[in-house]
Amino acid sequence: MRIGSQNFDYIYDPAWRAGLVQNAFGKSFWAFLAGAVILGLICWGVLGAETVLVALKEDIRLLIGLMPRVLVALSIAALIWVLLPRDRMAGLVGKDSGIRGLVIATLAGTVTPGGPSSAYSLLAVLAVSGADRGALIAYITAWATLGMQRILIWDVPFMGEEFAFLRFMVSLPLPVLAGLLARKLPLTLTVNDPDAKKRGEA
């Protein structure tokens, strides 16, 4: 049965479904799967089948415990991604934004959901819109070190709340410091602009 809204027509596009499968089961997935199988066989040979079964039971228990957190974290991240005022961000983190721009970029990087595809897409939009290079560095550093999806999906389930809080607090000043350092370095920032290439400008 087809969904009535045209907003969901992409679901029925074979190219979209093929791309979804390709992204979900890319090279990194098969690399991790191969590593797991190899280590499982080594464990089987060294410690026996009983140890492998115990490890599999623990994996299943961990997966069941993680899934609710993953679903909630991804739902929150998707809402933040939609609500984030991307068109105004460039004006807030321009060359004359000062420390305020670095703080705003840090907050934006912290709440940006998903992997590199979402983070670097927004980073590129900010870059070609006139964002300061210090703000760009602060943004991507915050995404890599303070990302809320990492805290909710990985830090808390695997290491506990105390570790997650400690890591967050220790890493909190890093994006601003990185942004300040980026502004001081005597380097020229050149950003790829795909639209310019299409227009024949680059």
Image (spheres, rainbow, N blue to C red):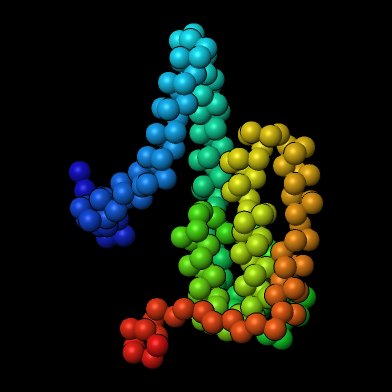
Q: Position of residue 130 (x, y in %)?
A: 58, 84
Task: Pick the residue in front: 6 or 189.
Answer: 189
- Tell me what residue is drawn at x 51 percent, y 65 percent: 120
- Tell me what residue is drawn at x 75 percent, y 74 percent: 180
Does residue 4 appear in the picture of this structure?
no
Q: Position of residue 92 (x, y in %)?
A: 66, 78
Quadrant for the N terminus in the image = top left
In the rendered image, the vertical position of residue 102 relative to residue 58, given as above or below: below
Task: Pick the residue in front: 7 or 32.
Answer: 32
State the residue lying farthest toward the bottom.
201
- Tell me what residue is drawn at x 50 percent, y 75 percent: 125
Q: Quadrant of residue 136?
A: bottom right
Task: Pick the residue in front: 144 or 92.
Answer: 144
Q: In this view, does 154 lie to the left or right of 21?
A: right
Does residue 135 appear in the picture of this structure?
yes
Q: In this view, does 163 lie to the left or right of 197?
A: right
Q: Exactly how many numbered labels are in the figure?
A: 0
In the rendered image, the vertical position of residue 109 relative to residue 65, given as above or below: below
Q: Where is residue 40 in the image (x, y as percent from the top left)?
A: 45, 22
Quadrant for the C terminus in the image = bottom left
Q: Where is residue 47 in the image (x, y as percent from the top left)?
A: 52, 12
In the rendered image, the vertical position of residue 81 relative to residue 165, given as above or below: below
Q: In this view, does 157 lie to the left or right of 24?
A: right
- Tell me what residue is drawn at x 66 percent, y 37 percent: 156
